Amino acid sequence: MTNKFLTLILLIATTLFTSCSSDDDNWTPTVSTPPSSGGIIDPEVGGFNQPNRVYVDLSTGEQLAVRRDSWEIAVYNGSENRVFLNSALLVSAAELDGITDITTVTEATTLTSTLTLNTLDQNFTPTTVTVNTVAELIQGLPVGYLQYGDLDAGISFTDSKEGELTGTAFGEISTTDSENNVYIINLGNEIPTTNNGTINTTGDARGVMKVRVLTNGSSYTIQYAALSNTTDFSEITIAKDNSYNLTAISLTDGQIVNNEPMSSNWDIDFGGVFSYYGLQGNLAAGLTYSDYTLHNTLGGVGLYQITVEDDSTPSYVDFTYDNVTEASFVYNNRAVIGSGWRSVDYMSGETSVKEDTYYVIKDTDGNYYKLRFTAVESEAGERGYPQFQYELLQ
């Protein structure tokens, strides 16, 4: 046996040994699970009222369905101190500038400065409204066509659809307590239970609360109370956990909620319902969508859309790893898919999948997939039953 051969044997043995974990004389080799090659997944959105947000990990093919009414706000676990709203529940929030004592705030509270905000009148004609009190502000908080705001002035009571940290309705939370104002939180809408033969996602209003968020940089303290409570408030303290993008809080139940997987364990969020304040034609209003899909930008997932317009663009079937364009991946806009994967005939109510559209994804593990939707309704024609096909590119 040659010296070179003995050296090779020793190198192999050393590699195997160092890739194993030891406990006294027992050791277990570390085995990497290969990523899923793809398949067909039916996200458990839940039907006509789309009650669930569904988080899908493409590399394992696993999904996690969570009731979209289980939380209202969530704190960010990264280096910045941010608060996100539950857009799937139509939650919105407005800051009370210069007001830091949560016990002093009621509907009768006068704002420190008058707000002039855009809205639409009952004829959907653009108009403005002057807001002087909390009660007047509350009138324009619910997400809907008449929602108050002013995009030119940077005033929006919802998080941006892109999901960037600077697009939250809450300003960045300061480590100086005296700089953190009270917010009025519109708690969104109930999930309706009546199946009227069509999609039905927005039920009765869930009311409002007042909230103040503090931080020391490594944890958050949430102060919250009913708007009528002028004597005390409740508190929840949450330590940052960078294994997760967000940690959610149920203000109505007063508890922390496990609402999404670890940030490295999901790629696509089938939120079903999604809302934000944005442009509709030339009008600004609160918009609500169904069948809405996001990707995990906070967790580093990249995605881009391909629309087949002619023979120069490969079809879904023909698209291969060699067709991937690295520069096309979008990491700063979670709503690239959005509702753009399906079409709705508003005269007939018929909904269908766009067959000329598919997506290329770079997941949290660095795997490349192509993905296309294959259904938006059940076989009986009921919304809330999406299906997609995906395939590993290698």
Image (cartoon, helix red, strand yellow):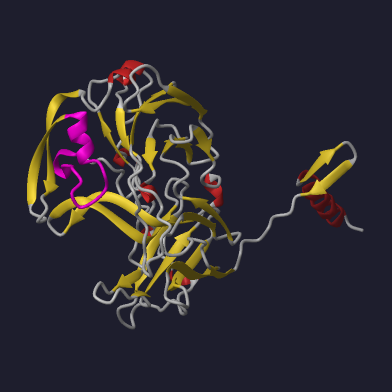
Q: Position of residue 313 (x, y in %)?
A: 35, 77
Residue 168 in view, yes or no: yes
Segment tinted magenta in the rendering:
133-155
Quadrant of residue 32 within the rendered picture: bottom right
On the picture, is 369 further left or further right than 376? right
Closest to the observer: 324 or 237?
A: 237
Number of residue marks? 0
Residue that sits furthest to the bottom in the current view: 311
Q: Position of residue 95 (x, y in %)?
A: 26, 30
Residue 170 in view, yes or no: no
Q: Is residue 112 magenta?
A: no
Q: As displayed, is residue 146 above or below residue 340? A: above
Q: As displayed, is residue 133 above or below residue 273? A: above
Q: Position of residue 362 (x, y in %)?
A: 48, 58
Q: Residue at x 33, y 30 (%)?
A: 172
Q: As displayed, is residue 271 above or below residue 306? A: above
Q: Residue at x 40, y 30 (%)?
A: 81
Closest to the observer: 268 or 222?
A: 222
Q: Position of residue 328 (x, y in %)?
A: 36, 60
Quadrant of residue 383 within the rendered picture: bottom left
Q: Residue at x 46, y 53 (%)?
A: 301
